[in-house]
Image (cartoon, rainbow, N blue to C red):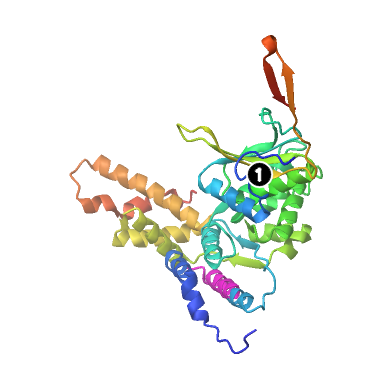
Amino acid sequence: MDREARIDLAADYAASGIGDVLDALDRELVGLKPVKLRIRQIAALLLVEKARERYGLGAGAPTLHMSFTGNPGTGKTTVALRMAELLHKLGYIRRNHLVSVTRDDLVGQYIGHTAPKTKEVLKRAMGGVLFIDEAYYLYRPENERDYGQEAIEILLQVMENQRDDLVVILAGYAERMETFFRSNPGFRSRVAHHVDFPDYENDELLAIAEKMLEGQHYHFSESARGAFADYIAARKAQPHFANARSIRNALDRARLRQANRHFEAGMPLTIDDLATFEAEDIRASRVFNGGV
Amino acid sequence: MRITQGCFSFLPDLTDAQISAQVQYCISQGWALGVEFTDDPHPRNTYWEMWGLPMFDLADAAGVVQEINACRKAHPEDYVRINAFDNTHGWETVRMSFLVNRPKVEKPLTLVRSEGQGRNQIYAMR
């Protein structure tokens, strides 16, 4: 081994193309500071690990299984997609693909149905990332004859034995995932990276809203922006708030009202009118009257 | 007697890495892969047993290799083959088929000759 060799991590970094993925992550996702930091750390670790491997210092295939915890609408699925891209560029998975499943896709309805079903999903995900949304539903302690346990056993086996074929990402709400891990210690020990997704701040949600609108070729008028900031504050205080997902739904409803307003006015419109949300489109929401 | 059937049959048996590479090629062509096995490799026996259902929507060879290994484990002394089925219009047929397992000792096929009507010679492989 050449002890004198100089290792140029910057060159490795540029060659792997993960810079683009990390930049896109920064650019396209608002907020999520701790998540972005964790992903940078994981990327750095994996890059260094590749360099070590080249010089015979490899520590064996690292465990890459992850758990993403956070409230609904905090971007877990989106980040998982980026993660698949990242791992692919670093050469830890062979295909840049992500198979997203829930309990229904893994657990069967009668005896003997679960194992083939789970294996089918695992085969489909091989070479890429398997994203299990709301993973805690796999485990139902209240029913001891639940078939979820069977799926868990098969999963654990594959997570251990085929680490170079498959990366599993478990996602769900923080508290329930905690209970899930506590009752299935096998999972906790096989998951290397726990990433926690924080809730968004009000100004971040507003930035997300503007980004979504930009993608749909809409924009807020000055007064509508103020109205939407009020909307976010009001909506957050209500139950079933799902972060970015609630924002998207609110914008969809605002689109409906905007279209209706133009239609009822019956006046000739400018192109700008078609693309602008006015305060009244936002203020008409039930949220301001105490509804959901 | 070494049975030669399907692709690559005059080459030495494929290694696992080679099988995986061929399977990956089939997947990249969008073909559905099926694993089949039989104890009767007679060329006229087209009815091999299916090992599970054909795999239609895989992205990586690892899933197929897993099934091949499971089939080999269950039937170490049988012939196992991979069929790659192309469903595009105008093809709709098996595009590639090759053996991935054969018994350690292969039973020989013998040529049987019998006499038919009008001293006609009838040949058959047994």
Residue located at (41% from left, 64% from top): A207
Residue located at (69% from left, 10% from top): B117
List the single residue furthest toward the left: A268
SS assignment at label 1: helix
User: In screen coordinates, is A253 left or right of A48?
Assistant: left
Instruction: Please tell me how crowded label 1 is: few (under 14), some (14-19), or many (20+) other residues with Cα within 10 Å.
Output: some
Badge 1: chain ID: A
User: In screen coordinates, is A5 left or right of A182?
Assistant: left
Say which amino acid is labelled 1. Glu
Q: What secondary structure characterizes most of the magenta part?
A: helix
Q: Name the image quarter holding residue B44.
A: top right
Residue A211 image position (x, y, % from top left): 38, 60
Q: Does residue A118 appear in this view?
A: no
Residue A248 image position (x, y, % from top left): 44, 53
Depth order, front residue of A283/B22? B22
Q: Name the image quarter holding residue A185.
A: bottom right
User: Which range of residues does the magenta coloring cover?
Assistant: A31-47
Q: Which residue is mark 1?
A: A120
Depth order, front residue of A28/A275? A28
Residue B31 image position (x, y, % from top left): 54, 41
User: In screen coordinates, is A221 left or right of A89?
Assistant: left
Residue located at (67% from left, 75% from top): A58
Q: Is residue A244 above or below residue A146?
A: below
Quick check: is A55 in the magenta stretch?
no
